[in-house]
Image (cartoon, grey):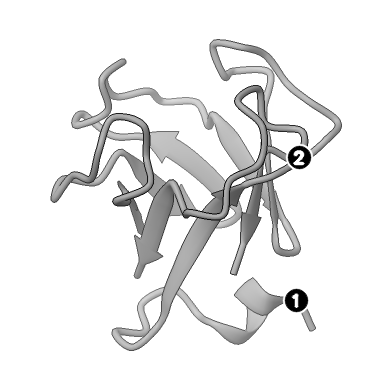
Amino acid sequence: MALLDRCPFGSPRCVLYWYPAYSHPSGPSREPWYVMGDSLVFPADGHPEGPSEKPWFRMVNDEAYPTEHHEAGHATVPWFTKKGSLIYPTEHHPDGASEAPWYEVR
């Protein structure tokens, strides 16, 4: 069972972190760039632009949609998709899709 499958969205005790993976354009990081609680994803301390108390993404099923708080604004199409414990950019992401994951969720 994948990590995210064991941690249902909506669980107040469930916090997961998105770590840039080897295939992220900026390379991997030991510090998480995002923290996810419930269905909201926030920039974490390790994010290059710093943390935010406002969510940048909302998870709907296995897809992450930018919120109105994201620097690029709200989008009605997903920028990322979750496959197991890996996060991939979709064709809607400004930098395009990737067959290699950009983030690992732990």
User: In the rendered view, would you say 28 is above or below 34?
Assistant: above
Q: Residue at x 41, y 25 (%)?
A: 76
Residue highlighted by disc 2: 22
Q: Residue at x 18, y 44 (%)?
A: 52
- Name the amino acid, label 2: Tyr
How far from the left and from the top, in percent, is residue 53?
13, 50
Left or right, 85 with reference to 76? right
Q: Quadrant of the N terminus?
A: bottom right
Numbered mark located on residue 2 in the image: 1
Q: Residue furthest left?
A: 53
How far from the left and from the top, in percent, is residue 55?
24, 46
> Mark 2, mark 1: which one is toward the viewer?
2
Quadrant in which residue 9 is drawn: bottom left
Q: Quadrant of the C terminus?
A: bottom right
Decide: few, some or many residues near mark 2? Use Cα within 10 Å; few <14, some 14-19, many ≥20: some
Q: Residue furthest right?
A: 99
Q: Earlier in the sequence, mark 2 or mark 1?
A: 1
Q: Secondary structure at mark 1?
A: loop
Left or right, 22 with reference to 28? right
Decide: few, some or many residues near mark 1? Use Cα within 10 Å; few <14, some 14-19, many ≥20: few
Numbered mark located on residue 69 in the image: none
How far from the left and from the top, in percent, is residue 74?
29, 24
